[in-house]
Image: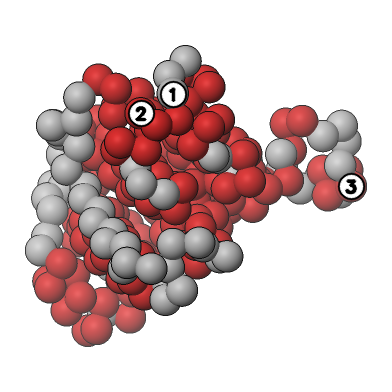
Amino acid sequence: MAKQRFNFTSDFTNLNETQMSILEESELILGKVGISGLELKNVAGKLGVSASLINHYYKTGEELVLSTVIYSYQKYIFNIQNLNRDESDPEQVIRSWVENTMRWTRESPGIGVILEFPIQAIRGSKFTSEPSEILTPFLKVVAELGQRNVSYLCSAIRCLQKGTPFKVYPALQIAAFIKTDARFAMYSSTVGFTTLGGGLWIAGRQADDVKNPFWMKLGFDPASQINSTLNEMLKLIKTGR
């Protein structure tokens, strides 16, 4: 069997209308149903086109899944940064990041799960027996996007900590702050991990669709309590400089 070449990109600016429609429909299916519901024929059926047309752009289901994850992840990151293009208040940038990250993980939990555990997308693949053939190029693109996302959030936290207007620091500068300032490292990891983990936790239990689940009877309202945690953390960042 000839070796399959997998190439991924975060540049979606030159996609034609058909390819964009494929990614958007794939994002809807993958985000809500997960890998089990995303097959080329399902996307083709939703769009009213032939499966061969999908194959023209994406040779395998794995390629479509991982390309969709990159597309959704990039869209979420760029959306936050575009929303705050003219924002100088770092606290508002942090709140915007948390709000939009929670929304993205709750609306598309299937995307978030694959982003964290991409090996699931190629388990039992007919096209490659070596996971690195597809995961290495995928993770390279994801790492670049993740660095941009983390640097953005950490920059807002650093500016709030120091009482300065919001600006984006280079990734190497953020790494230096984390290495030399334990408080900053704690603030950044707490806000980031609480938001991402909390969003996926809520999505996985679908609290809005379950009637009086046991943990809600105990008074646990995760969305409200994550917001309360954020409020207290922002106070701590501002006063614990």
Give the side of residue 15 with respect to residue 193, left or right: left
Residues 130 and 163: in front is 130
Q: Quadrant of the N terminus?
A: bottom left
Q: Position of residue 117 (x, y in %)?
A: 51, 64
Q: Residue at x 20, y 75 (%)?
A: 175
CB atoms of marks 3 and 1 within 8 Å = no
Q: Where does label 3 land, which residue?
A: 214
Which amino acid type is shown beneath numbered disc 2?
Answer: Leu
Which amino acid type is shown beneath numbered disc 1?
Answer: Ser
Q: Where does label 1 land, which residue?
A: 50
CB atoms of marks 1 and 2 within 8 Å = yes
Compared with residue 95, is residue 125 higher up or lower down, i.e. above or below?
Answer: below
For marks 3 and 1, give the CA distance: 46 Å
Residue 146 circle label: none
Disc 3 secondary structure class: helix
Residues 48 and 173: in front is 48
Q: Position of residue 25 (x, y in %)?
A: 45, 27
Which mark is nearer the camera, 3 or 2?
Answer: 2
Residue 53 circle label: 2
Q: Position of residue 15 (x, y in %)?
A: 19, 30
List the single residue furthest toward the bottom: 180
Q: Quadrant of the C terminus?
A: bottom left
- First in sequence, mark 3 or 1: give its number: 1
The answer to whether one can see residue 152 in this image is no
Question: Residue 238 falls in which quadrant of the image?
Answer: bottom left
For disc 3, the neighbor class at 10 Å (few under 14, some 14 to 19, many from 20) is: few
